[in-house]
Amino acid sequence: MTTRFSLVYVAQDCSSALDRSLLSAVGVADEVLVVDGGSQDDSIVVAESHGARVLQNPWQGFAAQRQFAVEAAKHDWILMLDADEVLRPEGKQAIVDLLREGPEAAAYFLRRCSYFHGRRIRYGDWAKDRVLRLFDRRRGAYDLAEAVHESWHSAGPVAELGVLALDHYSYANYQQLLQKMQRYAQLNAEKLVAHGRRVASYDPMSHGLAAFFRAYLVRLGFLDGVDGAAIAWTTALGSFMKYAIAREMQQAERR
């Protein structure tokens, strides 16, 4: 018997991206749920035009908002997508087949590829990407202490869907890339301090240089041209600022 499941989004001010993502997933799920954190654009109108059930919930943080959405869904199996992700046809079919035959694991990783300036990024830190997005909500939860890079924590076995399932359109331009880097650097620094990690004076530079070396040289980011260089430099700057901000916070606490 086919396992019924809900397609779930946590969204805010992303009407254009959400429209594209919902179009890619037409007919795949038994329910589409969009939890909106307080959009000022027409994200809610877009969601409802695709037949989604919309719940408005003031922004609680990444992990808490996702957990709220998971608990509000009608079905126990959840496909959690971001608005900037597009379900590829082969991914859509693989999910349908898996849930028709009966899943053996409690959660599944979905492989995804990223696009920037309309071109697929094939190397660097974005090349081999997978996210845990298909899962049984009865066998896991989001860690509400995670302020950034939140992920589903499965209490059962985890497997991988055997196809490239998602296209990821996270950034429209370099400005967005820098803005998100700045936001994540702050959140990651706060997480570092909260966990009691002491930051030495050399940590910002050493971690920044290591991040660039890994992304641009070890993982061949230079083969993606200017975009590959921009991604590597931004990743390095984000790593540098994460440790620099954390050190600044720790020094302020000691004063």
Image (tube, rainbow, N blue to C red):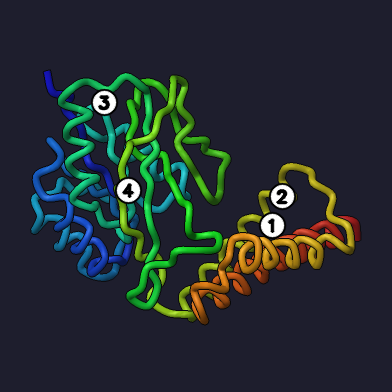
Determine whether label 1 and label 3 are within 8 Å by CB: no
Q: Is residue 197 left or right of residue 175?
A: right
Give, as a three-letter code, the residue at label 2.
Answer: Leu
Determine whether label 1 and label 2 are within 8 Å by CB: yes
Q: Residues within 10 Å of mark 2 (few under 14, many from 20)?
A: some
> How far apart, in angstroms, are the residues tagged by discs 2 and 3?
33 Å
Q: Dot 4 corresponds to which residue? A: 164
Q: Quadrant of the C terminus?
A: bottom right
Which of disc 4 and disc 2 is earlier in sequence?
Answer: 4
Q: Which mark is residue 189?
A: 1
Foreground mark, 2 or 4? 4
Which of disc 4 and disc 3 is earlier in sequence?
Answer: 3
User: Where does residue 32 sit, x and y in percent of width and height?
Assistant: 17, 44
> How far apart, in angstroms, are the residues tagged by discs 4 and 1?
32 Å
Q: Quadrant of the N terminus?
A: top left
Q: Nearer the viewer, residue 45 or 185?
A: 185
> How far apart, in angstroms, are the residues tagged by discs 3 and 4?
24 Å
Q: Nearer the viewer, residue 133 or 224?
A: 224
Tag 3, which secondary structure?
loop
Give, as a three-letter code, the residue at label 1.
Answer: Ala
User: Where does residue 203 sit, x and y in percent of width and height?
Assistant: 83, 60
Q: Quadrant of residue 141?
A: top left
Tag 2, which secondary structure?
helix
Q: Residue at x 47, y 21 (%)?
A: 155
Q: Dot 3 corresponds to which residue? A: 76
> How far apart, in angstroms, are the residues tagged by discs 2 and 4?
33 Å
Q: Dot 2 corresponds to which residue? A: 192
Q: Residues within 10 Å of mark 3 (few under 14, many from 20)?
A: some
Q: Nearer the viewer, residue 206 or 213?
A: 213
